[in-house]
């Protein structure tokens, strides 16, 4: 199906089996703030590394999986089947970094991250700069020994688990003043402090605090790539993550359809099983049809990356996939809650958890509105046939 190779199917099956073994811990994780028992967490992380399910997007020479974009999508689709972000342990370090990291950066941060011995997070978003990172106010000021970084970042996902962070800032002086640069900051570091940790709708172990960077000094070796290239790396990250968000939404939708169908088949009402009612059948049929459409779209867009299609076309198709898959999954979650009825409103129920968790997929890594603007812009410039 979907023109997948034997290797593709084997990798997908391996990832599916891994996530299947995490599913029994969802309810416990929900009760414990998204945290797995320490022994289970350690065992599953070891297994993820041993089975080649971590860093699938990284080159083999760095210890990664060297997987195609389609294969990465297949793995992350299975990640999406688990609630409470339990599947996030199948992590994907920033793919763009492999091409620009210095030898020092590879040895100190990148390779340890691929091995699972280090964890990164992104400090990019600000209070008044979300999907449009061109509005950043954080600054990087050049000094003799390096840079001084200042700014307050919002929604720094996984900060509580990270050993270092990427920090994007506007250069305050020098020949590239006004353009962006990306830096690496070890955690903890002097001048870095958590302002507060907001509570979010989902229950996962990865926090998203507001973090202040106040006079943080970093040496020249902590600049990623060149001055003025920070925006390029951010866009590369957004493009990649939009594929991964779409993939996880497919997995969530599939799980919801499976669970809702099983429940509707077993739930007896006065005149027979719930699934015998046409309005319930319609909700399930619409959900399955939309999942098929979203999966076909995403797999084709992923193959376009593997085939080396024009970068701007890739960007537009990534936006299409993220837009449609995230909105599709939200519709499926809403229908699933409705099918489960009162049970669907209980936190112990998979539909209730996904109903909360999937809402953010229409926001982070670029809102649905931003995705529509990207697609429309490329449509105006290139025409219909170039994009589909």
Image: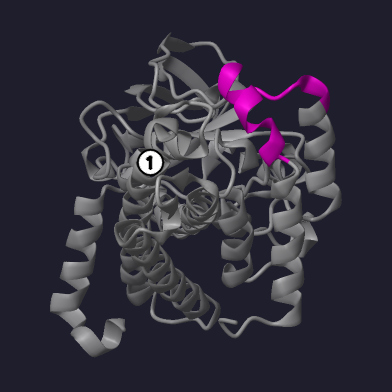
Which quadrant is the N terminus positioned in? bottom right
Q: What residue is drawn where x is 55% and y is 49%?
A: 266
Query: In which quarter of the view is residue 276 placed?
Result: bottom left
In the foreground, 361 or 315: 361
**Residue 137 horizontal side relative to residue 120, left or right:** left
Majority SS type along the magenta span: helix
Q: What residue is pinned by disc 1?
A: 337
Front-most of 226 and 303?
303
Whether residue 308 is visible: yes
Q: Residue at x 34, y 49 (%)?
A: 335
Mark 1: few, some, or many residues within 10 Å (few <14, many ≥20)? many
Asked whether residue 123 is in view, the answer is no
Q: Is residue 287 left or right of residue 1?
A: left
Span shown in magenta: 22-39
What colour scheme does the image use? one colour
> Farthest residue toward the bottom?
385
The residue drawn where x is 25% and y is 52% is 368
Left or right relative to 1: residue 49: right
Give above or below for 117 relative to 10.
above
29 falls in the magenta region: yes
Query: Split into 4 quadrants, where in the image is the C terminus?
Result: bottom left
Q: Measured from the top left, where is residue 167 in percent x and y?
A: 45, 33
- Seen in the picture, residue 377 relative to 35 is either above or below; the reply is below
Residue in the foreground of this view, choosing between 182 and 40: 40
**Picture coordinates of residue 112, whole percent (x, y):** 75, 40
Q: Residue furthest left?
A: 380
Q: Quadrant of residue 242?
A: bottom left
Q: Residue furthest front?
A: 271
């Amino acid at each position: 199906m979907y023109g997948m190779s034997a290797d593709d199917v084997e990798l997908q099956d391996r990832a599916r089996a891994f996530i299947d073994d995490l599913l029994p811990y969802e309810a416990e994780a929900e009760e414990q703030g998204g945290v797995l028992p320490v022994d289970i967490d350690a065992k599953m992380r070891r297994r993820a590394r041993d089975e080649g399910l971590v860093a699938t997007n990284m080159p083999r020479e760095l210890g990664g999986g060297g997987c195609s974009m389609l294969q990465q999508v297949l793995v992350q689709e299975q990640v999406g089947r688990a609630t409470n972000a339990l599947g996030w342990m199948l992590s994907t370090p920033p793919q763009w970094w492999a091409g620009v990291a210095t030898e020092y950066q590879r040895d100190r941060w990148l390779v340890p991250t691929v091995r699972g011995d280090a964890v990164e997070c992104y400090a990019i978003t600000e209070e008044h700069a979300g999907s449009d990172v061109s509005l950043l106010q954080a600054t990087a000021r050049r000094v003799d020994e390096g840079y001084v970084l200042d700014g307050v970042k919002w929604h720094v996902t996984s900060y509580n688990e990270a050993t270092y962070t990427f920090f994007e800032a506007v250069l305050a002086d020098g020949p590239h003043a006004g353009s962006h640069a990306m830096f690496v900051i070890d955690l903890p570091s002097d001048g870095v402090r958590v302002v507060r940790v907001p509570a979010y709708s989902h229950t996962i172990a990865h926090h998203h605090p507001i973090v202040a960077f106040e006079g943080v000094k970093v040496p020249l070796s902590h600049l990623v790539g060149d001055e003025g290239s920070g925006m390029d790396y951010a866009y590369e990250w957004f493009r990649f993550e939009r594929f991964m968000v779409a993939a996880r939404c497919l997995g969530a939708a599939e799980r919801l359809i499976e669970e809702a169908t099983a429940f509707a088949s077993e739930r007896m009402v006065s005149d027979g099983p719930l699934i015998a009612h046409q309005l319930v059948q319609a909700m399930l049929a619409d959900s399955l049809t939309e999942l098929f459409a979203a999966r076909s779209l995403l797999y084709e867009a992923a193959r376009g990356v593997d085939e080396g299609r024009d970068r701007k076309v890739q960007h537009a198709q990534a936006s299409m996939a993220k837009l449609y898959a995230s909105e599709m999954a939200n519709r499926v979650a809403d229908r699933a809650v409705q099918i489960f009825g009162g049970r669907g409103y209980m936190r112990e129920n998979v539909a209730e958890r996904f109903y909360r968790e999937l809402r953010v997929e229409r926001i982070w890594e670029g809102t649905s509105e931003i995705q529509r603007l990207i697609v429309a812009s490329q449509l105006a410039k290139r025409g219909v046939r170039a994009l589909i």
